Amino acid sequence: MDFEFSLVGGKISGPSGILTLMDDLGRALASDPDMLMLGGGNPALVPEMVSLWRERIDVLLATGTMDKLLGQYDPPQGNLQVLASLAKLLKSRFGWNVRIENIAATSGGQTAFFYLFNLLAGKMKNGQHRKILLPLTPEYIGYAPLGLSEEHFVGCRPLISTPDPTQPHIFKYHLDLPAVEQTMQRHAIGALAISRPTNPSGNFLSDEETQQLVELAAAHHVPVIIDNAYGAPFPGVVFRDTVPVWNESIITTFSLSKLGLPGTRTAFVVAAPEIIRAITAMSAVTGLSHGTLGQQMVAGLIESGEILDLGPQILRPFYEKRSQFAVESLTAKLRQHGVNGKIHMSEGAFFLWLWLPDLPIPASELYERLKRRKVLVVPGEPFFFGLEEPWDHARQCLRLNFAQPANVLERAFEIIASEVAAIMKGA
Ligand SMILES: Cc1ncc(COP(=O)(O)O)c(C=O)c1O
């Protein structure tokens, strides 16, 4: 039988960077033990975190909570006790003016963005077509296919600097605020969205840059969505000091995935009550309720406030060490093979963002060549969605997950550098 899909069905089930990424990752993990996995966004199995989750499961079993959480649905807003504890924690530790009406659970951050992007952008009642503005592109590949309308996103190029002249191989993106302002004037915008730290580049928009964006958005009466998938206050994979801020013009998301629980598919959205009511309704319609396990696994940690210590005490040191090792190792391999490569300053998250300004082939082709040599990376192109003009830079970048053990990174970097060197020589 030939199935015919609707326009919306066709759009959401069609090809996308995130589908290829998750598919390649899953297949390689399942079928090819020799593949060097620098592809998706899996967190490392951090030993302290693994023990913590085992302990939490023991407690859930011993107290009988496990039976209840497996055997009943939570309300679509989430577990009300967990949401109340989270509100209390955010208020007492950061002074955020939040109550239970300001928080909803979702089935992972990805689902939260599907709801938010389609709630705030697309065709409006007055016929206006609103877009989600990405102030600093490249941005998270997973956002790209989420908009149900055509041209759901518009993105701005960043400014590029070399922060330390003694390290010419390290570059950094910065917010181009005038470009963002101009884009807001040219398009009807429903919300601004940033991942902070940014997947793929590891850029961390400073508190000052973030404040500038919040003020600009407020002046246009639209919210700023801050995606804390890796950010503060949890999971806290941020290599900079920062003060987490929130007010009703900010929509903030937290996920348990990068704490080490991606399998539980759990995230929280903190926003104005009107947004939370809408998210709750969308959750009920699309999934009735959410997984109960993730919320219960962190319930005690939220209640005691310990969830805020995991980043500073365990995750930041772990990933910062990996990041430093990865930068040193990749720099050495590139030099050894005479490759002109620049690495984005690593300020958080799990990725090195490699820029190869002289690469004569598209990054997507380099990705295929590397896959044949058993190194899985993510090519840069799909992270540049929403830009209004083509940009050569978009085909010169690779994202490399550094959560893997040192020996895997070293072998993979050797192959990447030697392959690029061979391409430069015309091989
Ligand atoms: C920046 C960013 N946002 C959101 C997500 C979605 O994560 P999850 O749905 O597991 O919470 C990811 C996953 O890697 C991410 O990197």
Image (tube, helix red, strand yellow):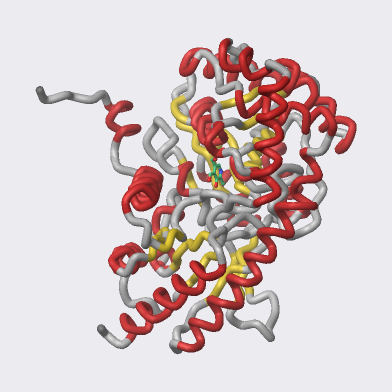
Q: Residue at x 73, y 22 (%)?
A: 83
Quadrant occupied by the C terminus: bottom left
Q: Nearer the viewer, residue 237 or 178?
A: 237
Q: Is residue 229 left or right of residue 311?
A: left
- Residue extending farthest to the left is 1
Q: Is residue 337 left or right of residue 250?
A: left
Q: Residue at x 63, y 13 (%)?
A: 68
Q: Nearer the viewer, residue 101 or 385?
A: 101
383 in relation to 163, above or below: above
- Residue 192 seen in render: no
Residue 163: percent from the left, percent from the top? Answer: 68, 75
Residue 389: image quadrant is bottom left
Numbered disc total: 0
Q: Nearer the viewer, residue 255 or 156?
A: 255
84 in relation to 218, above or below: above
8 in relation to 366, above or below: above
- Which quarter holds ligand 1? top right
Q: Is residue 348 left or right of residue 243?
A: left
Residue 110: percent from the left, percent from the top? Answer: 52, 36
Q: Nearer the viewer, residue 311 or 394?
A: 311
Residue 147: image quadrant is top left
Q: Residue at x 35, y 78 (%)?
A: 419
- Residue extending farthest to the front is 62
Q: Is residue 32 left or right of residue 57?
A: left
Residue 9: percent from the left, percent from the top? Answer: 30, 26
Quadrant occupied by the N terminus: top left
Q: Residue at x 31, y 80 (%)?
A: 423
- Residue 36 seen in render: yes
